[in-house]
Image: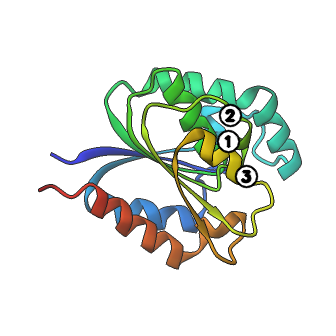
Amino acid sequence: MKQRLIILSDLWGTINIPWFSIYVDKLSEDFEVISYNSCELAEIPEKNLLEEERHRFFAEKGIDKAVTNLVTLEKEQLIVLAFSIGGTIAWKACLKGLNIENLYAVSATRLRYETAKPKAETILYFGEKDNYKPNKDWFDKMEVDYHITPKKVHEMYKEEEFAKRLCLQIKSNHESI
């Protein structure tokens, strides 16, 4: 039986997002993959909000709503791959009891505000040129595994080469003995 892996989108959701399907396709070979649209979890009222409006909605009430909805939806142990705001949702959901074995969060810059660490084995990925990534003191305090990808920006997860490498890493971390 395949391990269950959920993928949480960034603040743009999953509809007509070609990069998102790369992860779903690659990981579906080895996992039971369920994808979640972070916008739907957060119950964003409009689909045509500007980026700044989306950020504000998530920060004011959307993250908490998404966390509540995700914890209600998922009861089994799982692996999580999450992008940007999805990483923050997964982190907070784990703190609220979501049974996450491994959390892979990419460009989850809002984590820099977090002060409590989830119990899941966590690996974080950030681009070197992402101005909002947590600083070294935060990483040291949280004691989480992290990777800074040279010369990359916040949306590095949309690059096919990065996606392929990350999927291979996730697969190799969870190969059956």
* Whole-percent x, y for residue 160 in the image: 53, 76
SS at circle 1: helix
In the picture, the quarter occupied by the C terminus is bottom left
Residue 111's tag is: 1
- Could you say which is closer to the camera, residue 91 or residue 119? 119
Give the class, few, some or many, for how many residues have Cα within 10 Å of label 3's Cα (few <14, many ≥20): few
At 83% from the left and 51% from the top, the residue drawn is 51
In the rendered image, the vertical position of residue 77 relative to residue 140, given as above or below: above
Tag 1: amino acid: Leu
Residue 30, picture quadrant: bottom left
Residue 38, picture quadrant: top right
At 88% from the left and 48% from the top, the residue drawn is 52
- Could you say which is closer to the camera, residue 79 or residue 6? 79
Are circles 2 and 3 on residues that touch, CB within 8 Å?
Answer: no
Give the class, few, some or many, for how many residues have Cα within 10 Å of label 1's Cα (few <14, many ≥20): many
Tag 2: amino acid: Glu
- Could you say which is closer to the camera, residue 140 or residue 30? 140
Are circles 1 and 2 on residues that touch, CB within 8 Å?
Answer: yes
Tag 3: amino acid: Asn
At 64% from the left and 69% from the top, the residue drawn is 156
Which-is-in-front pick, marks 3 and 1? 3
* Whole-percent x, y for residue 14 in the image: 58, 53
Q: Is residue 65 left or right of residue 57?
A: left
Distance (Cα) linking label 3 and label 1: 11 Å
The residue identified by callout 3 is: 135
SS at circle 3: loop
Q: Is residue 8 left or right of residue 141?
A: left
The residue identified by callout 2 is: 114
At 48% from the left and 63% from the top, the residue drawn is 21
